[in-house]
Image (tube, rainbow, N blue to C red):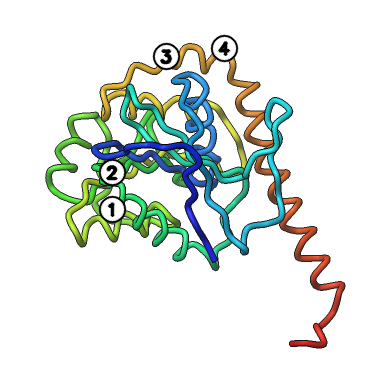
Amino acid sequence: MMEIVLEQKANLKGYTMIEGFPGAGLVGPMAISYLIEKMELRYIGHIESDDFPPLVAVHRDVPMPPVRVYASDKAKLVTVLAEFAIPLDITYELTNKLYEFIKKNGIARIVSIGGMPAPQQTVALETVFGIASNDTMRKEVQKAGLKQIGEGVATGVSALMLMKSASDGTPDISILVPVDPNILDPIYAELAIKSLNKLLSLKVDVNELDKEAKEVEAKVRDLIKRGRDVQEMHKKSIDQAGPSMYA
């Protein structure tokens, strides 16, 4: 069973949701972690599921859920930060829950952040791609200087959200930063945030990201590694236990 739990009262009508679950280059988590800190987004809730790994995140001595929801009333933003890679077999359920949450709360627009594996020599420096759910959003993509993808394939939660949005007309844009999947580089997050600044008229200072690049990278790398280790340990413990007598 999966549930989105709001622990603080929040009126999210007209807000933009920014999501970026762990994927190639960890672009989403790096960018969102930086946004939460620099824009001082407030923690308003979390997502819980029996299918999540048994993981508790500890931040500033406080135990917290590993998938958290943050918001900014001033910027009218709501975002989700996940500290482990989402298992493939619950991707559809998570997408459906998020989409129900978006519709129920009157969230007006979705912006996804992700990495697109690509040989770096084939992509011009600072090229960022965008996929939009409708013609109006495609104009926004073009206006923000993102390169549109004529043909291709998208995957994960953001891809499923985009498909749902295209069906019902919800404004949705996926920001895709070309990455080397074997390397974590804060420049990926910087490019994503620059694109967000243009799309949403934000003023997040990426110069500070340059200064804190290694700290941000190390933090996100550690978060994802811990989540992956817990999932592997959990799976191993189940395998070693053998078949249940009640199976």
Within-10-Å neighbours for mark 4: few <14, some 14–19, many 20+? few
In the drawing, what numbered circle is on residue 103?
Answer: 1
Residue depth check, mark 4 versus mark 1: number of the one nearer the observer: 1
Q: Dot 4 corresponds to which residue?
A: 211
Q: Quadrant of the N terminus?
A: bottom right
Is 107 positioned to the left or the right of 50 in the image?
left
Choose mark 2 or mark 3, whichever is in front. 2
Answer with the quarter of the image where residue 220 lies.
top right
Q: Earlier in the sequence, mark 1 or mark 3?
A: 1
The disc labelled 3 sits on which kind of residue?
A: Asp
Judging by the rendered image, the residue that carries numbered circle 2 is: 107
Residue nearest the viewer, comparing 193 with 102: 102
For this orientation, the residue located farthest to the front is 9
Q: Residue at x 62, y 44 (%)?
A: 65
In the picture, which quadrant includes the C terminus? bottom right
Label 4 or label 2, whichever comes before in sequence order: 2
Q: Is residue 28 above or below residue 3?
A: above
Circles 2 and 1: CB atoms closer than 8 Å:
yes
Could one spot residue 128 in this view of the protein?
yes
Kindly report which numbered mark, 3 or 4, lies closer to the viewer in this rendering: 3
User: Residue 75 in the image: x percent, y percent?
Assistant: 32, 24
Give how far apart the Cα atoms at labels 3 and 4 are: 11 Å
Q: Secondary structure at mark 4?
A: helix
Q: Amino acid at mark 2?
A: Ile
Residue at the spot x=39%, y=62% of the render?
A: 96
- Which label is found at residue 48? none
Can you tell which mark lies on residue 205?
A: 3
Q: Earlier in the sequence, mark 4 or mark 1?
A: 1
Counting other residues with Cα less than 10 Å from the Cα at mark 2, is it few (<14), some (14-19), or many (20 or more)? many
The amino acid at mark 1 is Lys
Q: Is residue 120 visible?
A: no
